[in-house]
């Protein structure tokens, strides 16, 4: 089980900032909302915000910083987006250029940070309903796949939907849909249940991001829209610069998961 399961968000971010936690954050600070990160120059920020508005399943926005500001005032005002994620990825002209644990040296007054809801948020709600999460059980990253479904274009931003997958026992699929539907601000209900081939995924054991997990007999692959979608969009749309979290290595906010649930 994750050793930071009971850490407060501030404690977890401090350990991450100090380089003492460079692993995926699924299960870290249980009960607190995690977020995907996208950082863009100000000139591209409006078009990306419009892209998020048009694709809310994949890119539900939790907070947006003003240009140059690196503390997300709405979700964690004492945090630093330059240092408080375990790993970052840098894309230049659509090409994955670098992965690092600190982006302080490339952050400037032109940068705008977007925090996007993450499906890790509803994992604890599933666990409370006695629905196990395989990537937590196997202590690995959640598997993520590029699908053949296209997002709605906004300006230069265009590309395929990325999904995360969790194997669910057949008897629990309906309850899983009910539970995750309570979290529309963090991807909400699944976008697909069942055959991966229907959405263009050829091999479940070969995810595009993250790690493969065991799918047992009697389990159904269930797919949710994923906040790694902007990384696939970056590779497709080729913005001059985009900084993101490394898949599975999220930003931990001060907000409780239940703040994003609806009855």
Image (cartoon, rainbow, N blue to C red):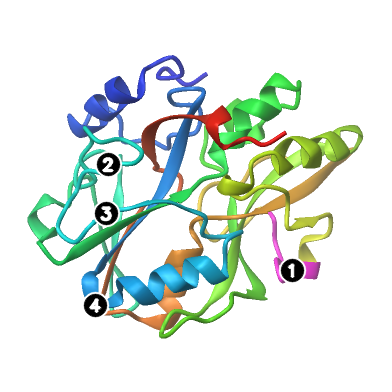
- Structural distance between the alpha carbons of marks 4 and 3: 14 Å
| Mark 3 or mark 1: whose residue is earlier in sequence | 3
Residue 22, image quadrant: top left
Q: Is residue 149 left or right of residue 95?
A: right
Q: According to the image, label 3 marks what residue?
A: 65
| Mark 4 or mark 3: whose residue is earlier in sequence | 4
- Give the SS element for disc 2: loop
State whether residue 232 is above or below residue 258: below
Q: Position of residue 251 (x, y in %)?
A: 36, 40
Q: According to the image, label 4 marks what residue?
A: 43
- Structural distance between the alpha carbons of marks 3 and 2: 8 Å
Could you tell me if the residues under marks 2 and 1 are in contact, i.e. CB atoms within 8 Å?
Answer: no
Q: Nearer the viewer, residue 82 or 136?
A: 82
Q: Quadrant of the C terminus?
A: top right
- Structural distance between the alpha carbons of marks 3 and 1: 34 Å
Q: Is residue 10 left or right of residue 163?
A: left
- Give the SS element for disc 1: helix
Q: Nearer the viewer, mark 2 or mark 1?
A: 2
Q: Nearer the viewer, mark 4 or mark 2?
A: 2
Q: Can the viewer see residue 84 in this picture?
A: yes
Q: Position of residue 246 (x, y in %)?
A: 37, 51
Look at 19% across and 48% down and name the residue there. Answer: 70
Q: Which residues are magenta?
A: 198-204
Name of the residue lying farthest toward the bottom: 155
Q: Can the viewer see residue 216 in this picture?
A: no
- Give the SS element for disc 4: helix
Q: Is residue 160 left or right of residue 176?
A: left
Q: Position of residue 123 (x, y in %)?
A: 62, 32
Q: According to the image, label 1 marks what residue?
A: 199
Label 3, residues with CA under 10 Å away: few <14, some 14-19, many ≥20:
some
């Amino acid at each position: 089980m994750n050793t930071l399961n009971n850490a407060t968000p501030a404690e977890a971010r401090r350990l991450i900032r100090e380089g003492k936690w460079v692993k995926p954050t699924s299960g870290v600070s249980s009960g607190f909302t995690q977020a995907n990160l996208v950082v863009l120059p100000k000139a591209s920020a409006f078009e990306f915000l419009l892209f998020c508005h048009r694709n809310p399943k994949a890119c539900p926005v939790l907070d947006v910083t003003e240009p140059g500001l690196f503390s997300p005032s709405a979700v964690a005002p004492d945090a630093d987006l330059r240092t408080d994620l375990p790993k970052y990825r840098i894309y230049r002209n659509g090409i994955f250029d670098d992965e690092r644990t600190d982006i302080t040296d490339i952050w400037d007054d032109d940068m705008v940070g977007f925090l996007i809801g993450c499906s890790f948020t509803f994992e604890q709600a599933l666990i409370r309903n006695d629905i196990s999460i395989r990537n937590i059980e196997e202590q690995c990253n959640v598997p993520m796949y590029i699908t053949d479904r296209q997002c709605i274009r906004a300006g230069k931003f265009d590309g395929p939907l990325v999904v995360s997958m969790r194997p669910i026992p057949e008897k629990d699929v309906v309850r899983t849909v009910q539970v995750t539907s309570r979290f529309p601000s963090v991807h909400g209900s699944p976008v697909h249940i069942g055959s991966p081939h229907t959405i263009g995924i050829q091999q479940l054991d070969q995810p595009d991001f993250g790690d493969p997990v065991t799918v047992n007999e009697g389990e159904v692959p269930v797919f949710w829209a994923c906040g790694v979608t902007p990384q696939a969009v970056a590779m497709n749309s080729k913005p001059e610069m985009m900084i993101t979290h490394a898949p599975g290595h999220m930003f931990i906010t001060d907000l409780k998961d239940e703040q994003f649930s609806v009855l």
